[in-house]
Image (tube, grey):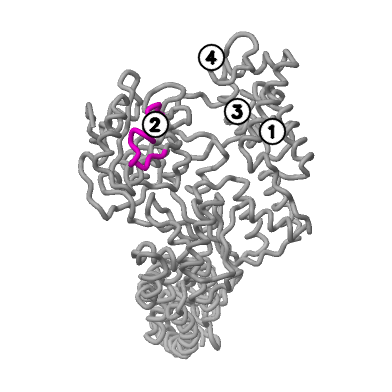
Amino acid sequence: MELKSTSFGKHLAQHPYNRVRLLNAGVEVSGDKHHYLIPFNQLIHIRCKRGIVWGELEFELPEQKVVRLHGTEWQETQQFYHYLMKEWQAWSLEMSEVSAGVLQQQIESLTRIEQQDAWFKRSRLADVHKQINRAFEAIPVPVERLGEFENCRDNYEICLRWLKQGAQSVDRRNLDWTEQVIDQHRDFFDSVEATPLNNSQCRAVVNGEDSVLVLAGAGSGKTSVLVARAGWLLLRQEALPEQILLLAFGRQAADEMNTRIKERLHADGIKAKTFHALALQIIQEGSKKVPKISKLETDSKTRRALLVKTWQQQCSEKKAQASGWRQWLNDELEWDVPEGDYWKNKALAERLGSRLERWIGLMRTHGGSQTEMIEQASEEVRDLFSKRVRLMAPLLKAWKAKLKEEDAVDFSGLIHQAINILDKGRFISPWKHILVDEFQDISPQRAMLLAALRKQNSQTNLFAVGDDWQAIYRFSGAELGLTTAFAANFGEGAQCALDTTYRFNDRIGEIANRFVLQNPHQLKKPLNSLTKGNKKSVVILPDDQLEKLLDKLSGFAEDDDQILILARYHHLRPEVLQKAATRWPKLNLEFMTIHASKGQQAEFVIIVGLHEGNDGFPAAARESVMEEVLLPAPEDFADAEERRLLYVAMTRAKHQVWLMQDKNRPSVFVEQLEALGVPTQRKP
């Protein structure tokens, strides 16, 4: 069947198309010089219009394309249109049955996802989208028309929702599954730790994304979640014990996890390790060597003695070294350096010892040559940094000589070797799941070790717990950005939060949380307390009232109550503690630096040294060019890490915190705490 424009209509229309012919399953629109074949499977709509003189047919195609035929006789146009519509609709009805079958198969696949007794990973969403799009490509009618057919409409809308709102669909589905599975396994969550896990802990444990970061405030049960996660993987038979690796940043933390695993999970194959123990295992199995860890890493006295002795020897033997070090200490660190043979000054040597340890550690962690280190520095500080590297070179040489003498490696060398073995494929990772505690303390070097393990096996999942509010180890190479930009560094996954603290009361929590969040760059997270405090749970006192405070504590503290006295530096240990053993024999007093108190808790905490100055809190000591070049850039907020350090100190306390200030040179933190409502008292 064919429809042509009239001669008059063709003349007036001046249109490239002047006739249309019905084919078996389509139409051909043509003119003297053009023709357009339109199969029914590309036809979205047909419209018939009446012009002033003639008729008009309009064929709508995908992507808003339109083909028009003008100048036909109106009555003939109507007849052709009705016949064409009848044929097209009959064909469409037949094809809708085929389309319904294709869609039904896709819906059955989506239903299996909905009903699957497992977490649906977001990484699988792209595969679902591909399946739906492949199904649409297999449908014999334009996808836009599926909503017209009753037998296709509902299933088509479901597929569209997965395409357009897939992430929300996955979240909704996983939330329903999470609630169901937690309820189903309530006995496990109630018994896997000493106390039943709360809802936020349970949700974190069952999260099945490839990369999961659990942000957990102080005292919120981070280690409990890690142990429960390992137990959950075993319960669900998602991994064998030997396929689960737990990592901690210190031997004590690893031992604590192993004790919990033994008591709670009764699984012999799971063992928590430090990153260094992991690197040692990789080297042993990947190279058939048994590396020996240097005494420089295990004995702090030996380490500091070597560095200080080498420094003193260099200064005494070489005038250029003595002059260079004097300038470094005077100009850059702003220390008061004695005249003459200053390197023989015992107090100065002790003070410098910790700095030397830090700088050697940073240089060893860098792993590159001195030339590469210098090239890393910006042009503004490159010359100065080059001078500092040259001054440190003899100490670095002495360090390497000691390693060679011992036939041993240090921790930095250990991890570098392990990464090299992994990159060469000489160690096959047995682990499907890596669980990391205190993730905010991770350094770029340790992150590279994790990345090398996961690169070797792309199916390895990473589950990490940490607290960016407790990130206080930048000086040793920890990089906070690895936590705050977790997805960018370790792959898209999930971020959870533990919302309850089991340690301190709500007053301590309120002050500590508000104080740390004055830094707008800190990630916000809820942290609710189970116990009530009062206005005097956090109090500011003059530092000359410490003895009276301890007198008062001796009157009401229970025999098993712990009292932590914390300071920014070792040398700020209060003199009054020298007589504590006999003056207050019943008090369980312990002094330590705030850095050392990480992971500790006590009924009462006393924070001393809240004064301004180089050894104050916050520390006003200038950062050396060594830290400026070899450490991550400091945060764009005044005293950001020192603020987190005070947060750590306050949140060690279960019941009460006293902050001892020097009224003659008060810390800026005192004014900020007072603005948050912390009361200042003249006496305890």
Q: Is residue 311 above or below residue 471?
A: above
Name the mark on residue 336. 4
Considering every residue shown, the one lying at the far left of the view is 534
Pointer 2 or 1: first along the chain = 1
Residue at image mark 3: 353
| Residue 398 or residue 108, whichever sits in front | 398
Residue at image mark 1: 373
Label 3 Cα neighbours within 10 Å, binned few <14 / some 14-19 / many ≥20: some
Q: Amino acid at mark 4?
A: Asp
Q: Describe the element under mark 2 as helix, strand or loop.
A: helix
Considering every residue shown, the one lying at the far top of the view is 339
Pointer 3 or 2: first along the chain = 3
State the separation of the CA atoms marked 2 and 1. Answer: 44 Å
Indicate which label's residue lies in the foreground, 4 or 1. 4
Pointer 1 or 3: first along the chain = 3
Q: Left or right: where does residue 514 sit relative to residue 232?
A: left
Question: At x 50% / y 65%, what residue is drawn?
Answer: 261
Indicate which label's residue lies in the foreground, 2 or 4. 2
| Residue 438 or residue 344, whichever sits in front | 344
State the separation of the CA atoms marked 2 and 4. Answer: 28 Å
Residue 469 percent location from the top left of the image: 41, 44
Considering every residue shown, the one lying at the far front of the view is 582
Pointer 3 or 4: first along the chain = 4
State the separation of the CA atoms marked 3 and 2. Answer: 25 Å
State the separation of the CA atoms marked 1 and 3. Answer: 22 Å
Q: Describe the element under mark 4 as helix, strand or loop.
A: loop
Q: Quadrant of residue 367?
A: top right
